Amino acid sequence: MSWEIVVGIETHAQLRTQSKIFSGAATAFGAAPNSQACAVDIALPGVLPVLNRAAVEHAVRFGLTIGATLSRRSVFARKNYFYPDLPKGYQISQYELPIVQGGSLTIHANGASKTIRVTRAHLEEDAGKSLHEDFHGMSGIDLNRAGTALLEIVTEPDLRGAKEAVAYARALHALVTWIEICDGNMQEGSFRCDANVSVRRAADQPLGTRCEIKNLNSFRFMERAIEYEAQRQIGLLEGGGTVIQETRLYDPERDETRPMRTKEDAQDYRYFPDPDLLPLVLSESEIESIRATLPELPEARRARFIAAYRLSEYDAAALTASKATADYFERTVAGIGGKQGAAQEHAKLATNWVTVDLAAKLNSDDLAIELSPVAPERLAKLLSRILDQTLSNKMAKEVFDAMWAGEGEPDAIIDRKGLRQISDAAAIEKLVDEVLAANARQVEDYRAGKQKAFNSLVGQVMKATGGRANPAQVNELLRRKLG
Amino acid sequence: MLNATLSELSAALAEKRISSVELARLFLGRIERLNAELNAFITVDASLALAQAHRADRDRAAGKAGPLTGIPLAHKDIFCTKGLRTTCGSRMLENFVSPYDAHVIERFEAAGSVLLGKTNMDEFAMGSSNETSYFGPVRNPWDRTLVPGGSSGGTAVAVAARMAPAGTGTDTGGSIRQPAALTGICGLKPTYGVVSRYGMIAFASSLDQGGPMAKCAQDLALLMNAMAGFDARDSTSLERPQEDYGRELGRSLAGLRIGLPNEYAGEGIEPGVRRAVDEAVRWFEAQGAKTVPVELPNTALAVPVYYVLAPAEASSNLSRFDGVRYGHRAKDYADLAEMYSRTRAEGFGAEVKRRILVGTYVLSHGYYDAYYLQAQKLRRLIAQDFAAAFRSCDVILGPTTPTTAFPIGAKIDDPVQMYLNDIFTIPAPLAGLPGLSIPCGFDDKGLPVGLQLTGGYFSEAQLLGIAHRYQQATDWHLRVPTEAPL
């Protein structure tokens, strides 16, 4: 019997603000414990929150990007619970009136596009961290993260299965980094997902009882956790059991989910509007001025790449995986410059280099494209040398390796290494004649129909020039001379 | 000097008839004599006060003196003071020293005033008698067996007993006006948002407002000029032009429309209170003011609404006192839950616990709509009542409290009776309106009676002007308490 796996995702995206959402303390990652917690973050008696408008702008950017309704008036509420890393004993969040309502995201999974509805996105503050090691039977509290601005993004249960869920999470990750509201660093916890998973026997049946899985800090874990959880629920139901609504924790070491708390011991958070903060009011002009700063969005850019550069769907998707990649690609194309109408040829070359050669280097050095030691303008210079036939592709790769190692401008490397390609027809012809004269046997073999003999002759010419002869010219000349 | 107003003291300092240091010594001496019995101050730091007085004298010598330079003040122990402990009347903060100053404290320091000490108060400002303080009850200088009112009872007694010429309080449901009335002094609760709450330990954030307490309306105006004003650190602070709260002190009363709510004349008002208030109203009429009957039909709901909303906010505001980062922490505990429960069981007194319980209850799932949400709706109706009333009058007059001061211990075990003492002071903060209490006579027992003036938003200067006129013709405000003679 087949089951449908239904998933909804809640994401906490840490907003890229210099200071915290309700205090002036800095938000940089990795500072010494409690060195970035001010009086407000520590919740000293008498301190009050003041809203950081930059966080609001980020939320508005997101809302505009997904075509959501932006609440002209939204309300901050207190979510009350006790925990040592929650200094006030409540978290300031948004409850009944979130800033972003509705909207949707398009994902591409299993060869098809699908629209995923976003229920809401609301602003809230992060808690601190409890450190349970190194304190001999006690816990340490680091409040550096306390008060960091978060946008919690909640979807409808529109996702079917782990693959779609991961495709959504990747698309959302690409989007929030694209519009520069989140740095997307999953290891540092800047982008954290929880998945609500349920199963049902058929699409027209009511939704099954769901479990929420926490602690999905990588796309890989998310996929495995959802797979595991769905199979666990199916096993339960097929064995005549029932699923209990609960929060479960994914343990990547054992590759399983474990119960954390059930609905029965769910806390009553006693939400109520925070009397220390006025309702958050957004004006039309504020929204419009934020809209004016939005970059071209991934879907639009992808369509433009296909139309303007004649890229394949596959290449366009790869080049718009992140804004940094798309920017790198376009800066490379622009850097090649040259004659009008050649843009498509340039784009094709740039596509190959960005998605293959550069991608391989970045991958092996575990670098983000923003940190590439070869700037797009330099890559463009290198590609120009291929286009003007100074370099063969093979020679270009050698130059690229040198550029990657920090040896400087491509032209300087070419000169230093003597890598300039020989395209002088007369010089090549002289060499070809010499090679033909010295290798009568291969000439005969070739004429007898042995293709391999031709390759050997090409190899001889290339060898004589230290690989610098223009291979196309060598091929052409040899063919002509051999009749 | 002990019975002088702030303007008189300011003049004496300016004319070098006394120095700031001498003035500080004078009041510190009076505190030394009376505080053991009256218990108005929790913390007095004479050396700090004298250091500030020396600085004030130096500033004056350098020609940098304002109206409050060198004036000693008593601040309620709810305002955080850097370097001087801030207890909020609670064991929870018995040894807490704030690393920063409250906005109000900063303002008075900038004005050159001298901090005599931190005054006693009901624990976390929860109480109407000053009996809930961890540091013991404050005694009323008109009769030491009586309460001074609360929660700002410490400042009220400090001013009434002439241990300080003036001071600060905070008002959530009457905590400035009620003790002012019960001790025969003046107290102003400003419009919500006029005085920054930054550094003022929160009880009920949507109601709390700091304000001045002094012998006369003119002094209140001087203090307001220093403490009011926009502060970006409090999101509910109102961004308005700086105003001179003394600008209406000379205004005539002719044509003033005084609203007399029927609801403020009902049962439960002691005859002595009623008589004194009626006499004051007749005096205003004699000055050319007109009285008009007004209706505040939702007045009876104010106390129940307040006792839903204030505890709801308090239950959340007081969650930060968990023993983790500062304040009291229980010594023995097996786990985290026990650390919380023991810390809070030991650190908080009975009234605070009662309000945390009530507040937690009314915010709980399944009760929120019936209590909290309903109370919010009624709060708006109460505000609308005032808006309607102020269409036909300029100021609403009535008693500040239904009774004069009551004996220590009389109501402490009956919270509802205690809460009803605030029946006339609770409506103004629910509507965010300013309210002023001034002395208007004595009852048969010789205890002071308070007259309450409630005005529209930002009418503080007008209220002070009206009160000043009255105080130019009467001397109730200058009477010295019988059990704290000069």
Image (cartoon, helix red, strand yellow):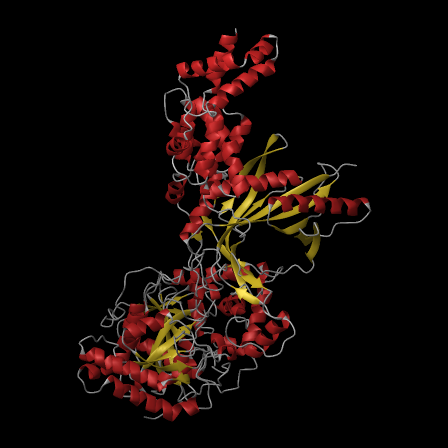
Residue B338 vertical placement versus A247 (above, below) = below
Residue occupying the point 76% across, 44% down:
A234
Which quadrant of the view contains residue A269? bottom right
- Tell me if residue A158 can be seen: no
Foreground pick, A19 / B18: A19
User: How many numbered circles are shown?
Assistant: 0
Residue at horizontal 41%, vertical 83%?
A: B43
Residue at image point 73% right, 41% down:
A200
Instruction: Quadrant for residue B167, please give it.
Output: bottom left
Viewed as shown, does residue A235 lie left or right of A29? Answer: right
Q: Is residue A297 above or below residue B92?
A: above
Quadrant where the N terminus of chain B is found in the figure: bottom left
Q: Residue at x 50, y 82 (%)?
A: B134
In the figure, is residue B11 to the left or right of A458? Answer: left
Q: Is residue B462 left or right of residue B204?
A: left
Q: Nearer the viewer, residue B405 or B18?
A: B18
Image position, residue B280 (x, y; %): 33, 78
Q: Position of residue B196 (x, y in %)?
A: 37, 66
Q: Quadrant of the C terminus of chain B?
A: bottom left
Outermost residue to the front:
A438
Give the percent coordinates (x, y) of residue B271. Answer: 44, 82
Q: Is residue A45 visible?
A: yes
User: Residue placed farthest to the top in the image?
Assistant: A483
Residue B314's place in the image compared with A371, above or below, is below
Q: Quadrant of residue B175?
A: bottom left
Near-viewer residue (B310 or A273): A273
Give whichever of B4, A161 is nearer the camera. Answer: A161
Q: Is residue A42 above or below residue B50?
A: above
* Residue A378 in picture, x, y percent from top left: 40, 34
